[in-house]
Amino acid sequence: MGKKFPIGGWVYFNMSDENYTVKEIDKWAESGCTVMLAGIIGGSEAETKKTLEFLDRAHELGIELILDCGGGYHGCTAEAAAKREEQVRKNYERFKGHPALRGFHVGDEPGTPKSLDNAIRAMGIHKRVAPELNPYLNMSGDTPWWDFSSPEWLKNYLIKMKDETGCKEICFDNYGQADGDGGVTGYLRTIQAFVEAAEAAGMECWETPICSAHGSYKQFTEYQYMWQITTSAALGIKGITWFRFYDRIIAPNYHGSPIDEYGNTTLTFDRLGRCQKRFNDQFGELLVTLKRKESWMLGFQRMCFPMFGENSHPLIKDVRSFERMVISTFEDKDGTEYLCLVNAEMKDPTTVHVTYDDEKCSLTGLILNGKVTEPYESGEYISLYPGQMAMYRIDRK
């Protein structure tokens, strides 16, 4: 079995909560999660022991954990940096070397120049203390549109973060897709802004999409959960941490999360679980080995990625679909190119026809991460349900 695509969710329980037990990890595994933000961890010996039990069980089930022990960017000023590093080092000593430990949570949504500077400082501390781990910082989906003196400020910010800290990953939240078709445009534009900025900085981009209904954000169908996974992955997202995995009785407007406030699994749990497992079974192990090259839209201009046309690719001459599509090319370490297609409709299936230059290449459909292959004839129809992905290897002659 290859490395799985990182996919999981946010958990807000405290390790001091006696009702929050290691049995929850079995639920995460049942739903196909491979990485989780595992809750808030205080400094007591009992919480350390309990967290180690969580890590042990997570490792048994193939899940990595991100631990929130404090030590984030809040208050991480230049004057406080030495004390913050001492705190981070103490937390690291509690859990270092555990194979299920992916990294520590550095914070959520820095939104001012000062907090953004503090975030870089905190990320640097975490990488200095634990260079083998990946500190987790989640930025606001609105971040690209903030005016901090340069239209390319986000790219410059991530380049500075990478140069000063050596960190490899950045995450952002993205919820507009749950708020109507105009929100879908915002969702796609936000992905483009973050992915392109991260790629320019030499970083990988993660995303926090939404699975917990609240406010104006509606509950999704199974098609729409898959749609979020596939459109994100096709456009270069390298990991997903859903907001959020549990409803809580202190937040009654939140509903429809995978697990409700009484500890019961919900319809979302079943739907999301099928989507996560199907995605990793079909594409996740392959996609973690590939690098995105280019991306396009088809059928509707979203004011972000370009529209696919007859001159978009030297070998793929035409892609026709009655419904909207996301199209990307990827490349593996050996230079082999891949064509990725996603039905970008949330409700309607579509039929796609790909025309390629069969004198210069052939296309091979990939099933089960390429364990099963099918030759694809130029112009042949491809049926895709809403949000379904298809992958093809482009074999040059």
Image (tube, helix red, strand yellow):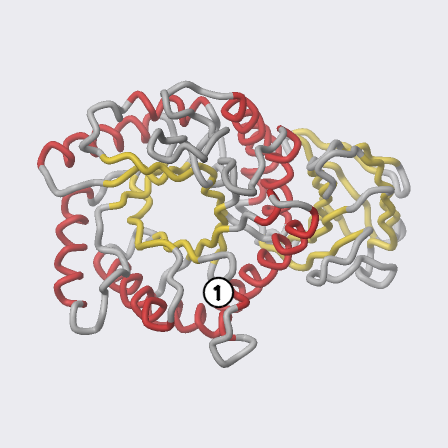
Q: Is residue 166 visible?
A: yes
Q: Residue at x 49, y 55 (%)?
A: 205
Residue hosting label 1: 202
Which one is nearer the viewer's eye here, 364 or 19?
19
Pointer 1 local density, CA inside 10 Å: few below 14, some 14–19, many at least 20: some
Asked whether residue 397 appears in the rendered view, the answer is no
Instruction: Choose between 112 and 239: the one closer to the eye.
Output: 112
Q: Is residue 102 left or right of residue 242?
A: left
Q: Position of residue 340 (x, y in %)?
A: 70, 46
Q: Residue at x 59, y 28 (%)?
A: 278
Q: Residue at x 46, y 61 (%)?
A: 203
344 w.r.t. 143: above or below:
above
What is the residue that sits farthest to the top in this orientation? Answer: 264
Query: In the rendered image of this protein, does residue 176 appear above or below residue 160?
Result: above
Q: Amino acid at mark 1?
A: Gly
Given residues 38 and 143, the one toward you in this image is 143
Residue 236 is situated, as x and y percent measured from the top left of the image, at 58, 53
- Residue 371, quarter of picture: top right
Spot occupied by residue 196 in the image (x, y as percentages of width and height): 57, 64
Q: SS at mark 1?
A: loop
Q: Looking at the image, how many numbered discs can be counted on the residues?
A: 1
Q: Dividing the picture into quarters, in which one does residue 76 lie?
A: bottom left
Asked if residue 85 lies left or right of residue 196, the reply is left
**18 up-or-down from 333: above or below:** above
* Outermost residue toward the left in this view: 45
Q: Image check: 281 left or right of 89? A: right
Quadrant in the rendering for residue 26: top left
Image coordinates of residue 46 in percent, x first then y, are: 11, 32
Residue in the image at 48% along x and 28% along y = 32
In screen coordinates, is 329 left or right of 64? right
Give the camera-side residue of 53 and 71.
71
